[in-house]
Image (cartoon, rainbow, N blue to C red):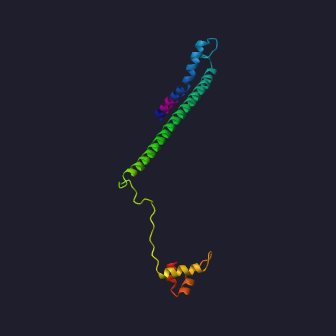
């Protein structure tokens, strides 16, 4: 337990000295410039408080500078990513343009689509019963709906067949 306590005291003393180092350095330089002011280590009880206050201001200035540097680096990285994305987008547009230009020269090539219009019509075959169901529903007029049992009664078929044809 005593070893831990001594290690903890050593660590805490080191942390205090690291924290107070900027203030002590600045006050020592100020004591050399202004010898009539008692700013050095022999300045009395107020020297430790003055050193702590100057150290707090120094560490605050360091934090503000680091924040500004991080902001500038972040801004620089953001601009680089935006530029890379813009370049990739332009390259993709050029690739598409080149593909369209090549399609004009090689209509049978693999760059050609399967159909010219892109739309193909499905062929649907109607038998007589389908046409009868369509005529029955058209007789109701626009805006009216008809049910499968009504169609089945009108045509004389099963309701399941009428539902399938509808």
- Vertical side of 131 occupied by 96: above or below: above
Query: Majority secondary structure of the magenta segment?
Result: helix
Q: Residue at x 47, y 34 (%)?
A: 4
- Vertical side of 133 occupied by 13: above or below: above
Q: Quadrant of residue 118?
A: bottom left
Q: Residue at x 59, y 14 (%)?
A: 31
Residue at the front extreme, as displayed:
105
Q: Quadrant of residue 16?
A: top right
Question: Could you tell me if residue 76 is visible in this image?
Answer: yes
Q: Residue at x 49, y 82 (%)?
A: 129
Q: Position of residue 40 (x, y in %)?
A: 59, 16
- Vertical side of 57 occupied by 140: above or below: below
Q: Position of residue 14 (x, y in %)?
A: 51, 27
Tell me which segment is drawn in magenta: 5-12
Q: Position of residue 140 (x, y in %)?
A: 61, 80
Q: Nearer the viewer, residue 6 or 66?
A: 66
Q: Does the segment drawn in magenta span residue 81?
A: no
Q: Residue at x 48, y 40 (%)?
A: 81
Residue at the left extreme, as displayed:
109
Q: Position of residue 35 (x, y in %)?
A: 61, 11
Q: Nearer the viewer, residue 135 or 7?
A: 135
């Amino acid at each position: 337990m005593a070893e831990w306590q001594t290690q903890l005291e050593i660590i805490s003393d080191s942390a205090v000295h690291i924290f107070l180092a900027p203030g002590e350095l600045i006050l020592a330089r100020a004591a050399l410039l202004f010898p009539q002011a008692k700013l050095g280590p022999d300045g009395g009880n107020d020297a430790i408080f003055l050193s702590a206050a100057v150290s707090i201001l120094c560490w605050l200035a360091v934090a503000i500078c680091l924040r500004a540097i991080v902001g500038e680096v972040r801004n620089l990285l953001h601009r680089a990513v935006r530029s890379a994305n813009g370049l990739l987008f332009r390259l993709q547009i050029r690739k598409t343009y080149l593909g369209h230009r090549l399609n004009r020269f090689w209509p049978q090539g693999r760059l050609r689509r399967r159909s010219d219009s892109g739309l193909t019509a499905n062929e649907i075959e109607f038998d007589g019963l389908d046409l009868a169901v369509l005529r029955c529903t058209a007789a109701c007029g626009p805006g009216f709906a008809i049910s499968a049992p009504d169609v089945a009664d009108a045509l004389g078929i099963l309701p399941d067949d009428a539902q399938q044809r509808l």
